[in-house]
Image (spheres, rainbow, N blue to C red):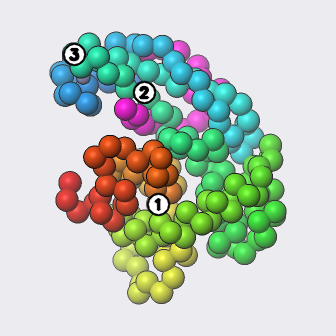
Amino acid sequence: MQILYPFAGSIQSYVEKISDPNRYRPDHCPQCEAQHPLTAHGFYLRTLVDAAFDGVIPVRRYLCRSCKRTVSLLPEFALPWLRFSISVMALFLAARLLHGLTLVEAARAAAQAGMPYQRGQFWVRRFRKQAPALSLALVPLAATPLGPATDFVSRALRMLESIGWITAHRFLFSQLRAPLLGWPAYLVPAGRRTTLAAASPTC
Ligand SMILES: [Zn+2]
């Protein structure tokens, strides 16, 4: 299971901070609810592309002695299944869908290290599909009431820009177990509902 590590700062400082296993060690198991601190269980490596970073980061893992399952502490600037960071995705989607840049220009604006615009094209498709559900799911975080929904894509984008993408992601993932662009079909967690809209009111 992945839980989010509430971290804001540079990637270098993230790597330094997680070298201490006690920092953010979960004090209970989120899977079996056993009320004892989890045991540090090494790291796994994953790739990440941020605005000015393209490389591999360690992700800390803990083990529950009761249920023998692991919990990994994903930094909240990284999305569970995407190589690109939330800020790269946010910059790309805003550049393309709010400010009308071309795919190539938006890719250039989003990642200094470079990103294939085809990747962004995929985000745009998923974002369009998710936009109505996202607009609904984010209502509890929105500061001001929104006007009538004529265009869910720009409404969802405006909400994300004003709430903050990482704050919105933290909410969606911790409360609804849903990543910003939804789960890809092959990763839908067992027993979880697949859309944000369906996941929100019942739990
Ligand atoms: Zn457990």
What amino acid is labelled 1 in the image? Ile
Please give left or right for residue 66 compared with residue 182 in the image.
Answer: left
Q: Quadrant of ligand 1?
A: top left
Task: Report, in whole angstroms, how far the alpha carbon at label 3 lies from the one at label 1.
Answer: 38 Å
Residue beneath disc 1: 163
Question: Which label belongs to residue 179?
Answer: none
Amino acid type at mark 2: Ser
- Mark in front: 3 vs 1: 3
Residue 11 belongs to the span the image colors magenta? yes
Label 3 CB sits under 8 Å from any ligand 1 atom: yes
| Residue 41 percent coordinates (x, y) | 42, 13
The residue that mark 2 highlights is 72
Residue 21 can be seen in this image? yes
Tell me the quarter of the image containing the C terminus.
bottom left
Residue at 53%, 42% (x, y): give it: 81
Q: Secondary structure at mark 2?
A: strand
Above/below status of 28 relative to 113 = above
Q: Percent from the top left, x then y, of residue 163?
A: 46, 60
Number of numbered callouts drawn: 3
